């Protein structure tokens, strides 16, 4: 098949990384793949040499020129290459894809990369709300990350398909050599969504019991957000028990060193960091937003799940994972096996089945 994947950039966020992984996976299965992105932005995700990379938009700081140009450039490429399907990454790139394909009988798939169900206490971006309420109806198909999202949508959309994200790394097959590290990762700026305050309160409950253990946070964000988190740590007496790693290019090495991965988010669509950590033998203690993390950690054999904002339960989960070495090592082994259910070849096969069905409609 000839496949167009349209995304904002070749670096940056998790959604972009997933799109690059899909492009690589399709190419490795022998498809003709075109990855269309803003090549003016820094690239940090490796693209398979078999993937054709095309520019999405002209270089401009003017959003109207940039995205108006994107429609024009994408439309020319659709006319030139005649893809079997166009897969858009999130709201804006999917909308550009749909407009650019007007007049062509080509299915356009919109891919959601966050939980469809929103937390009432957090403000919702207006374009996200508008897209989910109205624009999602114009696409041939909308993919969501989990079964809870599909159930939440119900009959509001006609063609909704659950499509899990593919695993970023190959599941580790070597001998595990773990250190007394509890790893967490995410954007510091989104501290409310990522629940960094919950992480502080949870760790503060038990940190004194385990002086040889430390929490490491991988991720960047606004300095004001970082200082707020540091202040919380000082107030709870753990400022010397947490290390900020900043932007890390060596996440694979970090996952392999860490014994435990800790997710404290208030909301997640399908937490890729959990899946990545599991693939490298981390035992996870994680929050579960209405069943979404449970689609990865599907039993206690693969990790411990708690309700968001429940710092007491999270502390108890960490306590068990630290003290019960036999259980922790069992979870580490089981996590690696569970991660294989999300391997790139397996997810690509699901995509192939979906695309074939859309072509025949």
Image (cartoon, rainbow, N blue to C red):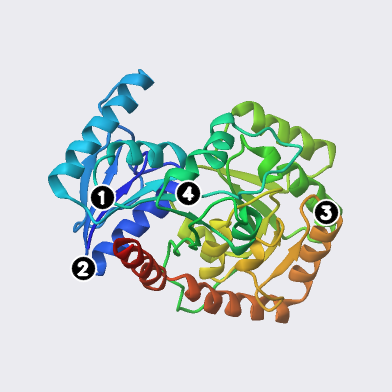
Quarter the N terminus occupies:
bottom left
- Estimate the spatial distance between the alpha carbons at disc 3 and disc 4, rounded to whole Å: 26 Å
Q: Answer left or right for 186 relative to 36.
A: right
- Image quadrant assignment for residue 138: top left
- Look at mark 3 in the image and give the residue it sits on: 310
Query: 67 or 167: which is nearer to us?
Result: 67
SS for dot 3: loop
Residue in view at x 60 percent, y 55 percent: 155
Disc tally is 4
Determine whether label 4 and label 2 are within 8 Å by CB: no
Element type where label 1 sits in the image: loop
User: What residue is shown at x 75% (from left), y 40% (from top)?
Assistant: 120
Q: In this view, does 358 lie above or below 107?
A: below
Farthest residue in the left direction? Answer: 80
Q: How far apart are marks 3 and 2 (CA)?
A: 47 Å
State which tag comes first along the sequence, 1 or 3. Answer: 1
Residue at numbered disc 4: 14
Badge nearest the viewer, 1 or 3: 1
The quarter of the picture where residue 221 lies is: top right
Query: Compared with residue 115, is residue 30 higher up or lower down, i.e. above or below?
Result: below
Which residue position holds label 1? Answer: 105
Q: Nearer the viewer, mark 1 or mark 2?
A: 1
Mark 4 surroundings within 10 Å by alpha-carbon count, few (fewer than 14), some (14 through 19), many (20 or more):
some
- Location of mark 2 (residue): 30
């Amino acid at each position: 098949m000839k496949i167009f994947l349209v995304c904002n950039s070749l670096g940056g966020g998790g959604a972009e990384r997933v799109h690059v992984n899909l492009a690589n996976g399709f190419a490795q299965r022998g498809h003709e793949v075109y990855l269309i992105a803003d090549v003016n932005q820094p690239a940090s995700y490796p693209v398979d040499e078999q993937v054709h990379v095309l520019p999405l938009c002209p270089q401009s700081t003017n959003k109207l020129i940039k995205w108006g140009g994107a429609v024009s450039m994408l439309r020319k490429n659709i006319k030139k290459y005649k893809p079997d399907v166009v897969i858009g990454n999130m709201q804006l790139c999917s909308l550009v894809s749909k407009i650019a394909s007007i007049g062509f009988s080509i299915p356009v798939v919109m891919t959601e990369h966050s939980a469809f169900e929103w937390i009432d206490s957090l403000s919702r971006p207006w374009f996200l709300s508008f897209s989910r309420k109205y624009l999602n109806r114009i696409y041939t198909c909308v993919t969501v990350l989990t079964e809870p999202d599909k159930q939440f949508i119900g009959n509001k959309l006609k063609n909704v398909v659950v499509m899990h994200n593919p695993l970023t790394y190959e599941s580790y097959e070597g001998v595990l050599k773990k250190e007394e590290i509890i790893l967490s990762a995410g954007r510091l700026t989104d501290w409310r969504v990522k629940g960094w305050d919950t992480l502080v309160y949870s760790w503060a409950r038990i940190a004194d019991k385990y002086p040889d253990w430390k929490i490491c946070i991988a991720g960047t964000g606004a300095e004001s957000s970082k200082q707020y988190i540091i202040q919380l740590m000082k107030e709870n007496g753990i400022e010397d028990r947490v290390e900020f790693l900043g932007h890390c290019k060596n996440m694979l090495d970090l996952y392999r060193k860490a014994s435990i991965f800790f997710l404290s988010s208030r909301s997640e669509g399908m937490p890729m960091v959990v899946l990545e950590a599991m693939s490298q033998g981390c035992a996870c203690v994680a929050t579960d937003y209405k069943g979404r993390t449970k689609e990865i950690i599907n039993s206690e054999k693969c990790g411990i799940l708690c309700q968001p904002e429940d710092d007491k339960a999270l502390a108890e989960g960490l306590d068990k994972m630290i003290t019960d070495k036999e259980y922790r090592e069992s979870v580490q082994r089981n996590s690696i096996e569970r991660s294989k259910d999300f391997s790139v070849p397996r997810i690509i096969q699901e995509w192939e089945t979906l695309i074939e069905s859309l072509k025949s409609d």
